[in-house]
Image: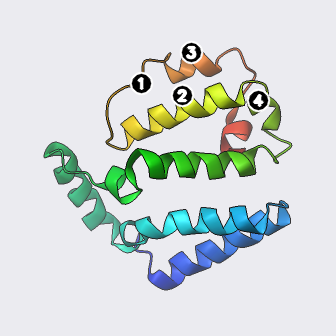
Amino acid sequence: MNISDYHFDCILDIIKQVLVDAGVKPKDSIEALMILQPVRADVTTGFTVRMEMARKNVEKGKDQLYKRLGESAGITQLIDSLYNIALMDARIKEFLTEHKDRIKAAQTIYIVELLGGPKSYKGKELPDIHKNLGINDYHFDAF
């Protein structure tokens, strides 16, 4: 699958409209769209080429997504923007509201590690965290 800059811009337009329709504040919408810009080249490079490059970079420990997203500070900003939007979504806000700060902190640490940052996540395995919450694919897709 090859996605051009034109297609990437179309996707951003769709995301922007979804955020508007969901009642997301313009400031949060702009911030969310800006966060996606550093990964434009990753998306617009051909899939086969991208997969081979990713495989080689991971093998060599040179995956730079963590750095391109602004390291821990950038990922924290991304998670903050995500939660500004998710907490307005009636489909999922009930799962996030009560322990929002704790969930955000753990999720940020997990995502930082997942994207190549420092290994510091000491929480439970994700299936164990979610198994008794009544969360299903519908909720994960909404998030």
Q: Point out residue 13 in the picture as x, y percentages from the top left corner.
A: 66, 77
Amino acid type of the residue that numbered disc 4 sits on in the rendered structure = Phe
Under circle 2, the secondary element is helix
Please give left or right for residue 75 compared with residue 59 in the image.
Answer: right
Tell me the residue that label 4 is attached to.
95
Tell me the residue that label 2 is attached to.
106
Amino acid type of the residue that numbered disc 3 sits on in the rendered structure = Asp
Amino acid type of the residue that numbered disc 1 sits on in the rendered structure = Tyr
Q: CA distance from mark 1 to mark 3?
A: 15 Å
Q: CA distance from mark 2 to mark 4?
A: 15 Å
Q: CA distance from mark 4 to mark 3?
A: 15 Å
Q: CA distance from mark 4 to mark 1?
A: 21 Å
Point out the tag, 1 or 3, that comes first from the N-terminus.
1
Under circle 3, the secondary element is helix
Point out the tag, 2 or 3, that comes first from the N-terminus.
2
Q: Nearer the viewer, mark 2 or mark 3?
A: 2
Q: Quadrant of the N terminus?
A: bottom left
Q: Nearer the viewer, mark 1 or mark 3?
A: 1
Tell me the residue that label 3 is attached to.
128
Q: Do the numbered discs 2 and 1 sit on residues whose CB atoms are within 8 Å? A: yes
Q: Residue at x 33, y 40 (%)?
A: 117
Q: Residue at x 51, y 85 (%)?
A: 6
Please give left or right for residue 123 compared with residue 66 in the image.
Answer: right
Tell me the residue that label 1 is attached to.
121
Q: Residue at x 84, y 66 (%)?
A: 21
Q: CA distance from mark 2 to mark 1?
A: 7 Å
User: Hey, which quadrant is residue 70 in on the image?
Assistant: bottom left
Q: Is residue 113 above or below residue 6?
A: above
